[in-house]
């Protein structure tokens, strides 16, 4: 006998974590470009220096103001490891930047409700949703708690964006699954 409750359990995977980082002092980007391997700096095209790491696979935009943006991490932990690695790399090359203040700005995740969704009915019954199939094939749902935006497709695939913690992603997809099930729009 097949357990339908188990087969409908939603799944998700974090695809990208974006974080902003602030250091207490400015950063001499010419000096970084000169000393730190794999850094890309072309101030005529972009005011920041780009540093790509392979472990964890991330890209960091470094600005002379002492600010950085870290993108591409697959977890919050990945962000912290990337920033720690860059801080050590800079210090190894004689560039002191101090202690970072890290803020997670956005977590994007893909998910699967493991059930098809009647988007027409969901759009009618779900508050804070928008569905215009002529313009976009997914329903846009603005969840209030946690505060995220979810793109829902008829296949049951979802994209969750706007989360500030990985736990928000898990909570959002579970709440969504229960809500859509209660509304009778999953099949």
Image (cartoon, grey):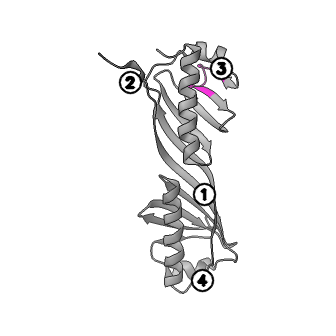
Marks 3 and 4, the one that precedes in the sequence: 4
Residue 187 covered by magenta stretch: no
Q: Main secondary structure of the magenta part?
A: loop
For the point 51% across and 31% down, the residue is 158
| Mark nearer the viewer, 3 or 2 | 2
Whether pointer 2 and pointer 1 mark residues with C-beta atoms closer than 8 Å, the reply is no
Query: In the depicted view, which residue is nearer to us: 104 or 151?
Result: 104
Instruction: Return the residue at label 2.
Output: 7
Instruction: Return the residue at label 4.
Output: 96
For the point 54% across and 87% down, the residue is 94
- Relative to 183, say whether 152 is above or below: below
Residue 126 numbered mark, or none = 3
Q: Residues within 10 Å of mark 2 (few under 14, many from 20)?
A: few
Please state if 49 lies on the left or on the right of 13 as rendered. right
Marks 4 and 2, the one that precedes in the sequence: 2
Q: Residues within 10 Å of mark 3 (few under 14, many from 20)?
A: some
Residue 19 numbered mark, or none = 1
- Relative to 112, say whether 41 is above or below: below
Q: Is residue 137 visible?
A: no
- How far separated are the C-alphas under marks 2 and 1? 34 Å
Query: In the depicted view, which residue is nearer to us: 178 or 83?
Result: 178
Q: Where does the image place residue 104, in percent across and percent down from the top left?
A: 62, 55
- How far separated are the C-alphas under marks 4 and 2? 52 Å
Q: Which residues are magenta?
A: 130-140
Marks 3 and 2, the one that precedes in the sequence: 2
- How far separated are the C-alphas under marks 3 and 2? 23 Å
Marks 2 and 1, the one that precedes in the sequence: 2
């Amino acid at each position: 006998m097949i357990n339908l409750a188990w087969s409908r359990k939603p799944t998700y995977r974090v695809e990208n974590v974006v974080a902003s980082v602030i250091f207490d002092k400015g950063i001499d980007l010419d000096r970084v470009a000169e000393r730190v391997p794999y850094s890309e700096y072309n101030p005529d095209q972009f005011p920041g220096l780009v540093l790509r790491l392979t472990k964890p696979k991330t890209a960091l935009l470094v600005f002379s103001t002492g600010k950085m943006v870290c993108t591409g991490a697959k977890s919050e932990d990945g962000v912290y490891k990337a920033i720690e690695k860059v801080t050590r790399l800079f210090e190894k090359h004689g560039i002191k930047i101090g202690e970072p203040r890290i803020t997670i700005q956005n977590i994007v995740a893909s998910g699967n409700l493991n059930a098809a969704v009647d988007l027409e009915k969901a759009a009618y019954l779900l508050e804070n949703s928008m569905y215009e199939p002529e313009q976009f094939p997914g329903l846009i749902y603005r969840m209030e708690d946690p505060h995220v935006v979810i793109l829902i497709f008829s296949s049951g695939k979802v994209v969750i964006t706007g989360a500030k913690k990985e736990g928000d992603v898990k909570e959002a997809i579970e709440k969504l699954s229960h809500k859509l099930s209660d509304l009778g729009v999953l099949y």
